[in-house]
Image (cartoon, helix red, strand yellow):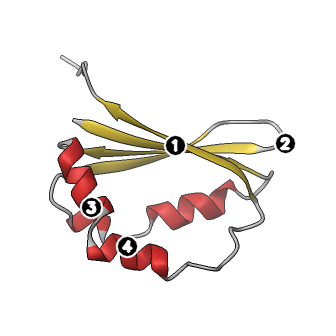
Amino acid sequence: MFVQMRKMVISEGHSDKVVQRFSKEGIVETQKGFIDMTVMVKKVRRGDEEVVILTRWESEEDWKNWEKSDAHIAGHKAKLGQPKPEYIIDSEGGKYEVKAVKKAR
């Protein structure tokens, strides 16, 4: 299994916009090897918020095929030249190979 992680720092009161964007139906759900996407918001009393998106794939190759697919590239080309939303303060990502998973008995 392969996981892509994206962590975003969002200005206070705007994490719901990011959650909505990544929660709506999209093309990724139809891609070979896609398992699921989890969108999480770190609980904070006030101040900047943190949103983490985990996308799980059957394999790194499945993820790479998605990354270079016409559908994925077209989605990014449509946003070329547009500024990122002002409520996104920072964004970073990582790619992980899953080595172990524990499940309930």
Q: Which numbered mark, 1 or 2, is in the foreground of this view? A: 1
Marks 4/2: CA distance? 34 Å
Q: Is residue 93 left or right of residue 18?
A: left
Residue named by callout 3: 66
Look at the numbered disc 4 and give the secondary structure of its residue. helix
Q: Residue furthest bottom?
A: 78
Location of residue 98 in the rendering, given as x and y in whole percent from the top left corner: 27, 27
* 2 or 3: tag closer to the N-terminus: 2
Residue named by callout 2: 47
Location of residue 33 in the rendering, given as x and y in whole percent from the top left corner: 17, 52
Name the residue: 30% across, 71% down: 27
Residues tagged 4 and 2 counted as in contact (Cβ below 8 A): no
Residue 26 visible in the picture: no
* 4 or 2: tag closer to the N-terminus: 2
Q: Nearer the viewer, residue 100 or 74?
A: 74
* Residue 73 badge: 4
